[in-house]
Amino acid sequence: MILHQRFIELGEGFGDIFELCELISTNSNRLHKTFILSSVTPAGLALSFAAAFEPANDSNFMPIYICREGILQQGSDKSKRRMLFEETAEKTGSIPVYIELKNSSEFAERDLFYHYVTGILRLNHLLPPLR
């Protein structure tokens, strides 16, 4: 039974991608799904990388760690950060789900953005419903 799902921001920089990849590697037994979330910005395509984990032990909390909109993709070439994230996920048996979203700047508050993302993930059965 999952009672609570929450996004936990790690940051936007290159070191944060390493931290997210380390979380995926060291908690591969709890990994639920990985995501690449994209949004269009005036500067180009902004990518977010996220990983959802099953609750630890007997808790009812499902964490979703995210590096939000920190990587800009120019053209069709994948960045080294994206390749690192995809390789790490695939080593644990997870193929990242690619989803196009509105940019977080379109929301008055960051919490509203995360409610929007959570709703889309649940509607597409990528996150379990709350019980």
Image (cartoon, grey):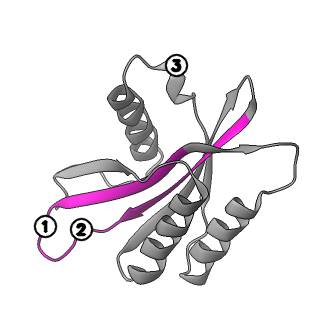
For marks 2 and 3 on the same chain, the one whose residue lies earlier in the sequence: 2
Residue 31 visible at all: yes
Residue 75 forms part of the magenta stretch: no
Where is residue 128? Give x, y as percent. Answer: 33, 55
Query: What residue does disc 3 label?
Result: 106
Name which residue type carries label 1. Answer: Ser
Q: Amino acid at mark 3?
A: Glu
Q: Secondary structure at mark 2?
A: loop
Give the total of numbered labels. Answer: 3
Q: Confirm whether the magenta stretch covers residue 51.
A: yes
Q: Main secondary structure of the magenta part?
A: strand
Quadrant (top left, top right, bottom left, bottom right) of the N terminus: bottom left
Q: Which residue is mark 1?
A: 59
Place of residue 63 in the rendered image (x, y in percent of width and height, measured from the top left): 30, 58
Is residue 119 positioned above or below 83 on the image?
above
Magenta segment boundaries in residue numbering: 45-68
Of labels 3 and 1, the one closer to you: 3
